[in-house]
Image (cartoon, rainbow, N blue to C red):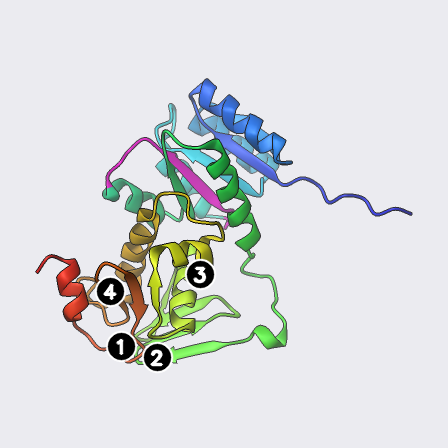
Amino acid sequence: MPEQDAPAAVVLVVEDEENIARLVRLYLEEAGFRVLAAGDGLDGLALYERERPELVILDLMLPGMDGWEVCRRIRATAHTPILMLTARQTEEDRISGLDLGADDYVIKPFSPRELVSRVRAILRRAVPPEAPAGPAAVRVLAFPGLLVNTDARRVEADGRRIELTAKEFDLLAAFAGTPDHVFTREELLNTVWGYNYLGDSRTVDVHVATLRKKVERDPANPRFIKTVWRVGYRFDPTGTAGAGAEDAREAGA
């Protein structure tokens, strides 16, 4: 018997602007996805619970229940990847979404082709926490005050279990897996997000900020994730406290 094609991944789009929702649906369906759509937060959450899609594209400013609350409720019970759409430009708003567990964000107005690329990249890298890995994948990276188990996707900082989003863990694993390597933002986008750089390297900075808040004792004086002025970031395996010269320059000192 001939092999059957794998079923199309299901993407839920929760967006109240009909023209945007229609455009996103068109591009996703042309890319081979099956698309569900809801126009407000309550309907979106109900549709999520009923259909359990592989990924959620979630507008932040929604009637009925905003995107932050929808994200919070999904994250309370599931690890489904969430890509947030936002017209807000401030770093604080983006950090709030990532703190709640969003995997990525896209700022309006956006390129539909870039959105599809990000959806594909997130789905390629989405690994359920309970999925077993082969023996060769078992790896524990140990540093002073930090343990990163890449098999169990588990992180401990100073003996405490740290809960990271999927993207935060992938970012930390990239850093810890190559200590002292200086990553450019574009390199991190390619390594962690899995797509070619398309214009917004600030997504890396926002994720680094949220990651530092979780694994560093003092995020303003990081032990591990150091800023390299005008280049990007590197991971210090010694866990030495203090910003260092490159971080001071980055801060404008």
Spatial CA span between label 1 and label 3: 19 Å
> Circle 2 is placed at which residue position?
143
* Total numbered labels placed on residues in the image: 4
Q: Secondary structure at mark 3?
A: helix
Secondary structure predominantly adopted by residues drawn in magenta: loop
Type of the residue with mark 2: Phe
At mark 1, the secondary structure is loop
Q: Can residue 62 be seen in the rendering of this structure?
A: yes
Magenta span of residues: 78-90
Amino acid type, callout 3? Asp
Between 123 and 151, the one lying in front of the other is: 123
Left-right relation of 197 to 35? left
The residue nearer to you, when weighing 245 against 242, is 245
Residue 15 location, x and y as percent? 44, 26
- List the single residue furthest toward the left: 253
Q: Name the residue tied to disc 1.
A: 239
Q: Is residue 2 above or below residue 138?
A: above
Which residue carries the number 4 mark?
Answer: 228
Does residue 199 appear to the left or right of 221 in the view shown?
right
> Circle 3 is placed at which residue position?
170
For the point 18% across and 67% down, the residue is: 246
Residue 72 visible in this rendered orientation of the protein? no
Under mark 4, the amino acid is Val
Q: In the rendered structure, are the residues bearing label 3 and label 4 in contact, judged by CB atoms less than 8 Å apart?
A: no
Q: The residue under label 1 is which amino acid type?
A: Gly
First of labels 1, 2 by sequence position: 2
- Front disc: 3 or 4: 4
Mark sitting earlier along the chain (1/3): 3
Residue density around tag 1, few if under 14, some if 14–19, many if 20 or more, within 10 Å = some
